[in-house]
């Protein structure tokens, strides 16, 4: 079932979400100081491409640097990525087949806003 949901996700929204995160990652990697944001964006792009079967958990070693980085991330790129998830989630929830995909989009909003201090793990 996970593979089927991931394939439908990929066709309907996963590809475009991953492209958005990759674009944000490339833009962040242009400057040396924002490379950690770019790496986090690439990590989330991988998750946005194939999300079912994985989840996001907070890192125990995240500290003040993650907090400051997340605040900067929200200002620079996080807000428009979160808006992208909300709009896509609403559009997907308009159909019966799209409801689980829309819910998955809404679950990705927190990590799109605050990616530092979290990691992506498999649910198995």
Image (tube, grey):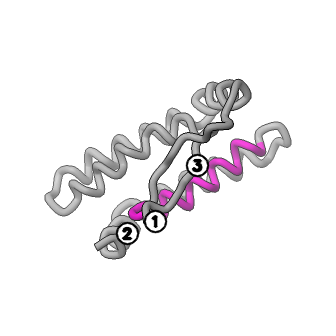
Q: Is 79 within the magenta?
A: no
Separation of residues labelled 3 and 1 (CA atoms): 15 Å
Which residue is tagged 2? 6
Marks 3/1 in contact by CB < 8 Å: the verdict is no
Say which quadrant the C terminus sits in: bottom left
Q: Nearer the viewer, residue 34 or 27?
A: 34
Q: Which mark is residue 119?
A: 3
Separation of residues labelled 3 and 2 (CA atoms): 20 Å
Q: Is residue 21 left or right of residue 11?
A: right
* Badge nearest the viewer, 3 or 1: 3
Which residue is tagged 1? 50
Which sits earlier in the primary sequence, circle 3 or circle 1?
A: 1
Relative image position of residue 82 (x, y in whole percent): 45, 38
Q: Nearer the viewer, residue 72 or 51?
A: 51
Which sits earlier in the primary sequence, circle 2 or circle 1?
A: 2
Q: Is residue 121 above or below residue 37?
A: below
Q: Secondary structure at mark 2?
A: helix
Which sits earlier in the primary sequence, circle 3 or circle 2?
A: 2
Using a 10 Å C-alpha cutoff, classify the residue at mark 1 as few (fewer than 14 neighbours), some (14 to 19) or many (20 or more).
some
Q: Which residues are magenta?
A: 35-53
Seen from this angle, which residue lies furthest right?
32
Q: Is residue 73 above or below residue 21?
A: above
Using a 10 Å C-alpha cutoff, classify the residue at mark 2 as few (fewer than 14 neighbours), some (14 to 19) or many (20 or more).
some
Say which quadrant the N terminus sits in: bottom left
């Amino acid at each position: 079932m996970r593979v089927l949901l991931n394939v439908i996700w990929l066709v309907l929204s996963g590809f475009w979400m991953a492209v958005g995160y990759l674009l944000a990652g490339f833009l962040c990697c242009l400057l040396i100081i924002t490379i950690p944001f770019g790496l986090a964006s690439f990590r989330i792009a991988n998750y946005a491409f194939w999300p079912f079967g994985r989840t996001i958990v907070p890192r125990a070693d995240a500290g003040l640097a993650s907090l400051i980085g997340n605040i900067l991330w929200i200002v620079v790129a996080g807000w428009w990525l979160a808006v992208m998830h909300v709009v896509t989630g609403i559009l997907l929830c308009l159909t019966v087949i799209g409801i689980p995909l829309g819910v998955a989009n809404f679950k990705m909003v927190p990590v799109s806003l605050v990616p530092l201090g979290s990691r992506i793990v498999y649910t198995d």
